[in-house]
Image: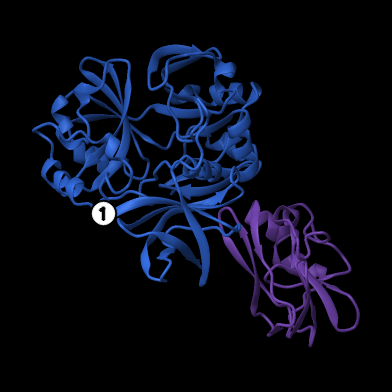
């Protein structure tokens, strides 16, 4: 499932703008489906400065480990503490959000149609 | 070109996620690994294990290559045993069923069946049989009381399907059966078991369940570089006989072990995996994870490890982070009998 009104990256993150230069980030429905049952999540520390495409979080399923990459350069401003790993499977775009950050650019962003094409839907 | 079991098209039609394993296109999951584990632990699950190897043996001299002698298995009983190399290393783990005084049926791992048959030599491969495992507390209610534990029955009907051999064995730590049947009947039995309420389970769930039960996987926990004593399989070794290829090497290894198996669990939900380093409290590497997973029963990561015999494990390095772990007695999970 792909939602309109948000952005995506080639690495299967989604970005929901919370204002001009701030966003909430998670992984897409395609990503959670590929991973299978998610059992463990590592979230970045608040205040951490990150580069675009830097690995900042980890989502781990029974069978594999996947890095989550910052969709832009910026600073981590929030994290979904108390997130139950299974929620990422059940509700990847809403309750399963991972972290919030400031955004310095949108160079890596894909539109819903571009992401749709990327995953071959 | 991948090989297929007789149930491959059934799996694909039901939407199973398929993946290559031991040269076969095998189902990894149907509903999801955790849902399938829950089904096996609380109700009943079925596994397509038709990729495994089968052979018939009539020559007791084969016992020379086995960790336990064939003659010591009573007719009608099964025995877990190891195919050994002269240095005390494990060529494969297998189960033998003594069908008659001079006929044993031996089941081999899919990844080793060619090597096993080459090693044993004087055996007849059996290639027209499929195998389905039914495991879980509701297994007996579903198909009836077919045989005692560690026994088997031959030429019976289960859910009105002809079965060559049904054994009360398994790889999950639950009660249940493994059905060996002609490949032409496999789809019928599979479908009937699903209709009776069994959950189709893939290799993903199979791996989680067997690690919870501390059962070894060839290639991960045991290999030609490990001996039975250091991997918790000393119970499968009978040293008290003359014509045993590994008698000398294993007698030495039993007397002077250098490594041991350890079961570790985590305080937090990190997932340990094969080959991750195991550390002592002083930060020295003392061994490796041989098999690891997330345990739905314990709701945390669990690991089977091979470590220095006298070391005390304290943590496992997971992606550069030192994750505190605690040694616990094995198995991690045992069903109250």
Answer with left or right where residue B255 lies relative to residue B302: left
As rendered, which of B110 and B287 lies closer to the eye?
B287
As rendered, which of B33 and B214 lies closer to the eye?
B214
Chain under disc 1:
B
Q: Residue furthest left?
A: B242
**Image quarter of residue B254:** top left
Picture colour for chain B: blue
Answer with left or right where residue B332 lies relative to residue A8: left
Q: Percent from the top left, x then y, of residue B106? A: 30, 29
Answer with left or right where residue B11 lies relative to residue B181: right
Could you say whether the residue bearing mark 1 is in a helix, strand or loop?
Answer: loop
Above or below, B109 relative to B59: below
Residue position for label 1:
B225
Q: Residue furthest bottom?
A: A104
Q: Percent from the top left, x then y, of residue B123? A: 22, 30
The residue under the point 81% across, 61% down is A93
The residue under the point 71% across, 59% down is A30
The residue under the point 84% across, 62% down is A3
Picture colour for chain A: purple
As rendered, which of A55 and B331 lies closer to the eye?
B331
Q: Percent from the top left, x then y, of residue B182? A: 43, 22
Q: Percent from the top left, x then y, of residue B282? A: 41, 70
**Image quarter of residue B243:** top left
**Image quarter of residue A118:** bottom right
Answer with left or right where residue B228 lies relative to residue B151: left
Q: Is residue B291 visible?
A: yes
């Amino acid at each position: 499932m792909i939602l309109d009104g948000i952005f995506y990256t080639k690495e299967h993150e989604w970005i929901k703008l919370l204002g001009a230069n701030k966003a909430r980030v998670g992984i897409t429905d395609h990503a959670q489906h590929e991973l299978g049952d998610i059992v463990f999540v590592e979230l970045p520390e608040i205040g951490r400065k990150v580069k675009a495409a830097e690995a900042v979080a980890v989502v781990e399923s029974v069978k594999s480990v996947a890095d989550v990459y910052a969709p832009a350069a910026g600073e981590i401003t929030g994290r979904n503490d108390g997130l139950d790993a299974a929620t990422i499977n059940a509700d990847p775009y809403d309750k399963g959000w991972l972290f919030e950050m400031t955004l310095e650019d949108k160079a890596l962003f894909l539109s819903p149609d571009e992401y749709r094409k990327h995953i071959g839907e | 070109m991948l090989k297929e079991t007789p149930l491959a098209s059934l799996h694909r039609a039901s939407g199973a996620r398929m993946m290559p394993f031991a040269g076969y296109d095998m189902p990894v999951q149907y509903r999801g690994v955790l849902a399938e584990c829950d089904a096996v632990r609380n109700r009943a699950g079925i596994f397509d294990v038709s990729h495994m190897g089968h052979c018939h043996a009539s020559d007791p001299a084969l016992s020379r290559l086995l960790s336990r002698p064939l003659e010591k298995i009573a007719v009608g009983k099964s025995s877990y045993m190891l195919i050994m190399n002269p240095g005390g290393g494990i060529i494969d783990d297998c189960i033998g069923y003594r069908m008659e005084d001079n006929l044993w049926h031996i089941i081999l791992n899919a990844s080793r069946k060619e090597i096993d048959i080459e090693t044993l030599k004087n055996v007849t491969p059996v290639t027209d049989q499929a195998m389905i495992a039914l495991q879980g507390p509701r297994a007996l209610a579903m198909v009836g009381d077919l045989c005692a534990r560690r026994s088997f029955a031959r030429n019976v009907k289960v859910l009105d399907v002809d079965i060559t051999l049904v054994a009360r064995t398994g790889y999950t730590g639950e009660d249940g059966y493994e059905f060996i049947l002609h490949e032409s009947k496999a789809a019928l039995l599979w479908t009937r078991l699903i209709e009776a309420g069994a959950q189709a389970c893939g290799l993903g769930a199979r791996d989680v369940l067997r690690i919870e039960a501390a059962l070894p996987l060839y290639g991960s926990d045991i290999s030609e570089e490990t001996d039975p004593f250091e991997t918790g399989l000393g119970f499968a070794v009978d040293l008290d006989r003359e014509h045993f290829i590994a008698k000398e090497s294993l007698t030495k290894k039993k007397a002077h072990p250098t490594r041991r198996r350890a079961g570790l669990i985590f305080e937090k939900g990190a997932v340990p995996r094969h080959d991750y380093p195991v550390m002592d409290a002083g930060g020295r590497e003392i061994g490796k994870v041989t098999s690891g997973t997330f345990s739905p029963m314990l709701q945390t990561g669990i690991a089977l490890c091979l470590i220095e015999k006298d070391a005390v494990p304290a943590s496992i390095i997971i992606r550069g982070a030192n994750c505190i772990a605690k040694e616990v007695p094995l198995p991690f999970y045992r069903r109250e009998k």
